[in-house]
Each structure stands twice: as C-alpha cells, then as structure tokens.
Image: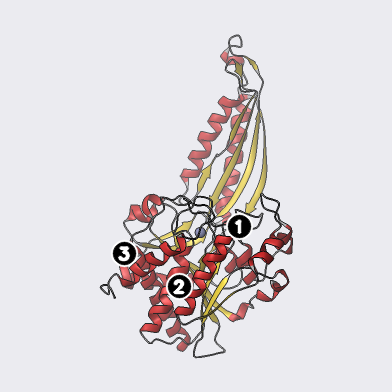
Amino acid sequence: MRASPDTSLGQRVMARIDELARHTDEPGRLTRLYLSKAHRAAAEAVLSLMRAAGMTATIDAVGNVVGRLTGERPDAPTLIVGSHIDSVVDAGRFDGPLGVVCGIVAVEELTRRGISLPFALEVVAFGDEENVRFPTNLSTSYALAGRYNPAWLDGVDADGVMLRDALIAFGGDPAGIPALARRRGEVLGYLEVHIEQGPQLEAADRPVGIVTAINGITRARAFVAGEAGHAGTVPMAMRRDALAAAAEMISAIERIGAARADTVATVGVAEVLPGAVNVIPARVDFTLDLRAPDDAVRRALVAEVGRELQAIADRRGLSLAIEPFMDSPATPMDPKLMAVLEEAAATVSGPAPRLPSGAGHDAVAMATLAPAAMLFVRCKGGISHNPAESITESDAEVAVRVLIDAIERLAAKVAD
Ligand SMILES: [Zn+2]
C-alpha cells in the first residue's frame, strides 16, 4: 500500500534505515564495525535491496556493496552515489546508511517512473569510513579510488585480529583489491547524501545544505613549562605558573578560532603536572585541533595560534614547544556538481545553504578519483555518533527528491 505521494519516499528511507539498524555487533546498542558479523549481515541486506531495485549487485573484494543500474550509453562514464554502512561504537542509525538508502530509493523511483539514464548509476555502501576497528583511513573508498595502502592489510584490531584475516573471514579477497580501482575517466562524479552532524541547518531552518569543502585538519601537542613552587610561599609576582599560562593560551585559541568564518579550534586534552592542590603547576601539556575548509586559511590560523601562544609564554617567562602530529588537507567539493545539487535543492525545497563539513567522509577519498559533492541533511540538535541521532521523515523525503532531481539534471547534461 502506497502512502501519499508527498511522503512515500521519505517513509521508505526511514523504514530501510530502521531495518539496517537491526544489524549490530552488540545487543542493545548499534555498533557495526568494518568486517564484523553485523557488517556482513547489513551488507547482505543492502545487496537484497539493490537487487530488488533492479540493480546488479555484488559485495566486492574489500567489503563494499556495489549496485549498478546500466545506462543507455555503454561508453558513458558512471555516476556513483555512496556512503558507508560501518558505524562507531554505540552509534546512531543515520550516519552513513542514510546516503546508501537514499541512493537505492532514488533508483527505485527512477525505475518506477520509467526513466532510463544515459550513464550507468552505481550505489556503493562503503565499509570502512569510521576507521574504528583498524588503523586505516577510508580504506574501502580509497580502494575504488585506486589509492589503497597495502600496509592497511597488516593492521590489527583490539583483539589482535589482522585486517587481512578479517577480510578473508568476511568473504573478501585481499589479492583482489588492486583490481577494484576505477580509472579517472570512467567516473562522471560522486554524490554523497549524509547527515550534517552539526547544528547549522537546524539553526537556518533548512532541510538540506550543500557542502563546500571537507575541512582540513591540523593537530598538535603543546608543552608549556614553568616552575613548580609552594602554593603558600611563592608571591604571585614571582611565579611561573604553567597552568595559568595555559588557561590564557586556551582562551586565545578559542578567540582566534572564532575570529574567522568557518574555522574551528579545540583543546580537547590537557594534563597538569605535578597536579597537587598545594603546588604551583610546573607543566601543562595540551592538544590542539584546528580545522578550516581552505588550506591557506588553516595555515594562517595555525600561524596565528603559534604566535599568540609564544607571546603569552614569553610575557610570563615560560617555555613553549608545539609539535604538530597531523596535517590533513582540505577537500574542496566540485563547483559544477555543487551547482547541480544546489539547483536540485532549490527546485525541491527552496534555497539550500552552503556549509563546510567539519567531519571527514568517503567523499575525501572519492574526490581523488572524480568530481565529488555532498548533500547534508538537517539532523536533530546537530547530534551524531550517538543513539540520539535523528532526522525527520520529511527531510529524508527532501533528500531523496533532491538526489533524484540532481541525477536527472546530470543525465540531461550528458544527453546534450
Ligand atoms: Zn558518516
């Protein structure tokens, strides 16, 4: 029985997401790690959905589920729509599966309407986006992009299981991974629908937004060294208090992070030594996480933080060392594909804001292969990586309609 045409697609998306959420490695909460039993079960469920939608579908050598709807022109490059079905521990149900299910429902709807596309349309359910179980980085999407790092196969999980062995047990084939690589010209583009994982669309009262870039990240450790002393006997003017200095530094980091549009700066870990109620702190070590959608902006942010922290240390007579340990460039989304999504969104639900992604996605890997763009869907309270993660059925409806509209626009461009 079909519901009213305005909500049937959204209803179908929500029902399938609920269905996938049943596949978990831990009773009572959703945890679906790469190559686990629950991952296999979810992959088979996705495979069935894809086949029922009229796609030829397989689980590939690295554990991706790949469904393909052939196009009218065999020589035309393929459009890929994807996201992931692995999760964090105690996850929400939408982070990842939303993009996969929207792709499948879009195919069902195109088929129902009797629309045939000039190009092949693939829906891919990647398996290793969260990078929770093994020390990998988007390994399954990098396999398609032809950038799989063979050293990932030697990575071990917390139980000492090697990725290579887990992949074989899952039904995959380590030797088959290199052959998964697509050639650049074979892929027309990559589209990913994903929950926003932040509060901006909710604040703007818009159902969907267009991602401009996936933020680059700089991470570093800062070491502030002063001098320990008796909390009762050393006069205030004669102290070199590392924690008081660090407090001033952390305030400066917050101010600098907030001074530019779209940048964020976080101190997530701080340790005080020696850490006693009656001792002036001698040393504070803290972490820095600085993100920006543009690498030049991020470098400027990092430089300003460095200058400001050094000035605080100098004025207080303390020593400071900053040691970077991660530098991940920003991934700008493709302007033409962004425009297609933007026009589609304008048609379906009105103007869609542009916003950067603070979190990483499979689109980072896929953008090394083909033009990539992402559609963000409003999520309640901006909450993700949490069982409280939620979206509305009507926003799911908008997302899948925008995706269908974008696919049709791309088809019209190819047909021209
Ligand atoms: Zn995700």
Quadrant for the C terminus, please: bottom left
Confirm or reject: label 2 Cβ below 8 Å from ligand 1: no
Q: Which residue is mark 3?
A: 394
Residue 123 place in picture, x, y as percent = 51, 74
Mark 1 Cα shell of 10 Å, populated few (<14), some (14-19), many (≥20): some
Q: Could you tell me the amino acid type at mark 1?
A: Pro
Judged from this view, the residue extending furthest toward the top is: 233
Where residue 323 appears, as percent x and y from the top left, is 68, 41
User: In this figure, which residue is indicated by the disc labeled 1?
Assistant: 329
Q: Label 3 to label 2, Cα distance in Å?
A: 16 Å
Q: Which mark is residue 378?
A: none
In the image, is 112 to the left or to the right of 152? left
Residue type at tag 3: Ser
Taking the image as drawn, is residue 372 in sight?
no
Is the residue 235 above or below the residue 409 in the image? Answer: above
Q: Which circle's residue, 3 or 1, is located before the other in the chain?
A: 1
User: Number of callouts in the render?
Assistant: 3
**Which amino acid is tagged 2?**
Gly
- As measured in the structure, the alpha-carbon distance from the residue carrying label 3 to the one carrying label 1 is 35 Å
Q: Which residue is mark 2?
A: 103
Categorize mark 2 by other alpha carbons within 10 Å: few (<14), some (14-19), many (20+). Answer: many
Q: Position of residue 103 (x, y in %)?
A: 45, 72
